[in-house]
Amino acid sequence: MKSKTSNNVQSNTSPNKPQISEDTPVQYVKGVGPARAKLLDKLDIKTLGNMLYFFPWRYEDRKNLKKISALTPGSQETTAGRVISSNVITTPRKRMKIFELTIADETGELTCRWFNQAYLKKYFPRDQKVILSGVVKGNPYSGFGLEMDNPDFELIGTDDKLIHTARIIPVYNATEGISVKQLRTLMFNTIETYSSLVREYMPEDIIRRNSLAPLPWAVREAHFPEECIDISVLNAGVSPAHKRLVFDEFFLLELGLAFLKKKEALEKGISFTYSGTGLINDFMRNLPFKLTHAQERVIREIASDMKRDLPMNRLVHGDVGCGKTIVALVSILIAVENGYQACLMAPTELLAEQHYMNIHNMVEALGLNVALLTSGSKNKVLEDISGGNVQIIIGTHALIQEQVNFQNLGLAIIDEQHRFGVVQRATLRSKGNNPDILIMTATPIPRTLALTLYGDLDISVIDELPAGRKPIITKVFFPSQKDRIHARIKDELSKGRQVYIVYPLIEESEKLDLKSAIDGAEAMKIKYPDNSVALVHGKMKHAEREDAMARFKAGDIDILVATTVIEVGIDVPNASLMLIVHAERFGLAQLHQLRGRTGRGTYDSFCLLLAYPPFSEDGRSRLKAMESTGDGFKIAEEDLAIRGPGDFFGTRQSGLPDLRIANIVRDIKILERARNEAFTLAEAEPELKSYPDLKETLHKKWMGRLELIKS
Ligand code: ADP
Ligand code: MG
């Protein structure tokens, strides 16, 4: 355990009480206790510090107390008055208890109802002064008089502080067992009592240069704004308090990344030689096409990394179909030519199989041995790997299991990295003696943003598609237009092309989805008696699936019905049409990935999106974006705008500290400044000796991951 630092602010503690700090388990916070601690744990609140940094997701303006006669039906309003009557009524039929309260001020009366909360009666004696906040409605029966259902209320004593009304109030994400109101009260008391524990750890000159508000103030303000500030500024997350907190989140993220990068730069890696002769020469001579300029450039960048005796950490980033596999393969050949093993890790078994088949075919002639390692692999494969019988190993997550020992791993490639995190990357690295690492992703991320998620990596972009690629014509259809869809499919089949039909597979309705894919395949067999139809899905036996895919690739199958298992990596140039069923249920990036399975040959290609209304506003935007652009970068930006950055980046899985308040899109300017400051500081203060508080905060934020990465 780390010892508590001695320079902690001493507050609210007498000498004989144990000292409370940000690390104190939330259970011991005043007003919490073991039962509530369990509930808070569901919100990921484990310590007092977590609680102080659990910010509201929005705010409501309840500052403007209105007279009752001025309340507008339909709006959320706040008003005050005295109790003139209160009753519990039982409904005759359902026997539901309703607590009914009427208050009055000098301008009128307002009636409020709470359902199944008879116990409330005891709080409202006659003449009690009360503030109420809720949506106003007219009386539905009599047509006159004003009402509120389930308003928030606050009883006004003589010198009580108002928490829920008559101010700008924070709205927290509550959870079952603890209401928004209870949480607000708890947060209010916590902030009152403990916000002085928040320490300023930021170097003074950084505060000055960036005009940052003081941290303890910012924490308080973000919970219970006192400063006269517009509600819209708060809800947009751009108040001075928010800006400070956002800066800190980015700063700590980037500082950690800066240290990771520095640390890795100090480690000795393998210095490969690359002459462009030998194996690679043989391989290139047999390539049926010429590399694009972008591919050549990226290969040069990788080769020059591999030559240096520092470990490579490079991200190759390029749209679907830009030809990343060849680039990976050339890097693999560099390692192999130098007598090292190379591995390629894919996110799914199907994709690993695909890569295995492709790469196996491409290097067979060079006399190299390739192995496929998945969770079901036999021990023989493990022996081949540790004994050095295979030079190239393609696999899934199974590659990072403990029992896998490489003879001499020199290069590790991770395909589709968005599903692998910093931590897995470190594990993979520990499988060799500082092997080079190359990450390939087809999820095109706007470059500035890539810096954040992959901040400790160098980045190469393949920004060019192979010549002769035709744009994929994309169009949305509705169920009433099925005839037109079939006409298009028939047309393609008659030209000798092949067709994909994709069904969604969403976890919560997995069984149903699978059934619709199976039914879909049966229906296609009946509809297209002269064509061969096959079905592939994730629940199939590995060998069966492989067989179906191979037959589709060979052209023996005309129509491949699939669940999203084919999302990535399948490569059949003769397949020129894809129908995506229930397109409204897919994410944008996923639709783009899927669509990229077509348009791989020289034929005009089509992507038909069959959408079932009604669908959400987001669903509509996604379909529109698909119709209007084929550019993966534009799609990514659109996706980011629709889904928001948290979901898009999946920082949780990535092993990076969470961004709770910062928004990578909205706050990009702050990100850039924070990044500069962080990298400058890491250079100037390699051990943060002058900033012990900052150092401690940084380690806490990264929760030990900085150490893990070092090993
Ligand atoms: P992705 O970047 O999506 O992984 P792939 O590496 O699977 O793309 O390549 C897509 C297709 O393009 C494959 O059929 C591949 O053989 C082909 N290809 C790759 N590079 C070129 C090139 N320079 N010229 C023509 N075709 C290419
Ligand atoms: Mg690929």
Image (cartoon, helix red, strand yellow):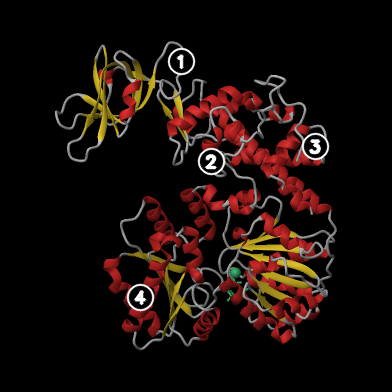
The first of marks 4 and 1 along the sequence is 1
What's the amino acid at mark 4? Asp
The first of marks 3 and 2 along the sequence is 2
Q: Quadrant of ligand 1?
A: bottom right
| Residue bearing mark 4 | 519
Rounded to the nearest whole Å, what is the CA distance between mark 3 and mark 2? Answer: 36 Å
Q: Residues within 10 Å of mark 1 (few under 14, many from 20)?
A: few
Rounded to the nearest whole Å, what is the CA distance between mark 1 and mark 3? Answer: 45 Å
Is residue 467 among the parts visible in the rendering? no
Q: What kind of element bears circle 3?
A: loop
- Of circles 4 and 3, the one toward us is 4
| Residue bearing mark 1 | 160
The first of marks 2 and 1 along the sequence is 2
Which quadrant holds the C terminus? bottom right
- Of circles 4 and 1, the one toward us is 1
Is residue 98 among the parts visible in the rendering? yes
What's the amino acid at mark 1? Asp
The first of marks 4 and 2 along the sequence is 2
Q: Position of residue 175 (x, y in %)?
A: 46, 41
Quadrant assignment, res 275: bottom right
- Of circles 3 and 2, the one toward us is 2
Q: Residue at x 69, y 44 (%)?
A: 702
Q: Is mark 2 within 8 Å of ligand 2?
A: no
| Residue bearing mark 3 | 688
Q: Nearer the viewer, residue 444 or 618?
A: 618
Which quadrant holds the N terminus? top right
The first of marks 4 and 3 along the sequence is 4
The first of marks 1 and 3 along the sequence is 1
Q: Residue at x 78, y 52 (%)?
A: 710
Q: Residues within 10 Å of mark 4 (few under 14, many from 20)?
A: few
Quadrant assignment, res 59: top left
